[in-house]
Image (tube, rainbow, N blue to C red):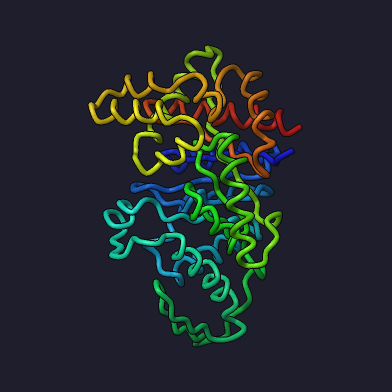
Amino acid sequence: MATIGICSFTPAIETTVEVAEAADRAGLDAAWTGEFNDRSAIVALAEMAHRTRSCRIGSAIAYAVGRSPLVLANEARGLDEISSGRLALGLGTGTKGMQKGWHGERDPEAPASRLEELVPLLRRIWRLHEGPVKHEGRFYSMNLTATAEVPPPTREQIPILTAGVNRRMIETAGRVSDGLICHPTFSTRYVEEVVRPAIAAGAARTDRDPEDVEVVGMLMCSVHEDEQIARREVAAQIAFYAAPKAYGPMMDASGFASEADAIRAAFAAGDHEGMIAAVSDTMLDAIGVAGTADQVRAGIERRAGDFDHVGLYSPSFTMAPERVRRNLLDLVEVGAAAAT
């Protein structure tokens, strides 16, 4: 049985932290948060570290671009210290457009190679107390020498997880990471036919055991006493994610090429209702979980076999912030019931 956590990702940091506190009290394994172009995962994690006591706190994801390796390493080191060794550092690059337009990256190519260079470098920076860090690579150059005595970090190695959607990015987790953060649109079929084999292939390249790579699923869930409202909320979020062409191959591999084509056509026409209507019942049930509390608990248990850890993830597209908050708090309760 996979462990269960909550992905507390909301526009308001106070709400994000409120949900993390509830997850901690309920005994869930982890509270995750993310970032976008208007919020920082690092800032939210700092507050989560202070207001939780036992659950892991993790980024799903923080951007690996836009921060230097030293800044990122020190942010993670500090978060792990104030959380008493509970940080799981989840990293991703975002799309090429996000790398260029949001983060000013001039070379957005080869994101997998970037992460494969960055992850070992972060681990070396955390061992600065053992000696200088000198590195010359494709993406990073570093000549770091401690100018004063540097104490060792809270833990010898902070877990680093990397996000991936396509096969090559998923292989990166197998090659260098402690875990893979799955996209919320992953179906059971995609996990079985693409994700697990890609992790194994990546692990084989670096003589690692694929069982050492934690597979963290982000499972879209909506709890509502009216099943149809819950299903519409999940369908809207699936449509939001399926609209970019970048996710087309993943949708094809899951068997939803026709639905994705219809979603993209509706998106191009500015037809949000058409996007939602294009999500078939089969697509919705393969990707997300929606309905009453009992239905969602059963759905979580059904999908738990796909992952080592399940982060319950609330839809937000077309939803009011208070509705997202209520859904997340309900998911904490349902997740705790499923975990037991």
Residue located at (62% from left, 59% from top): 178
Residue located at (23% from left, 26% from top): 269
Residue located at (59% from left, 55% from top): 88
Q: For the C terminus, which image quadrant?
A: top right
Viewer-closest of 59 and 277 = 277
Q: Position of residue 289 (x, y in %)?
A: 57, 25
Viewer-closest of 337 and 19 = 337
Q: Position of residue 193 (x, y in %)?
A: 59, 41
Q: How many marks?
A: 0
Q: Position of residue 117 (x, y in %)?
A: 49, 70
Residue sitting farthest toward the right: 340
Q: Position of residue 220 (x, y in %)?
A: 53, 32
In terms of image quadrants, where is residue 270?
Answer: top left
Q: Is residue 295 above or below residue 174?
A: above
Q: For the N terminus, which image quadrant?
A: top right
Viewer-closest of 184 and 28 = 184
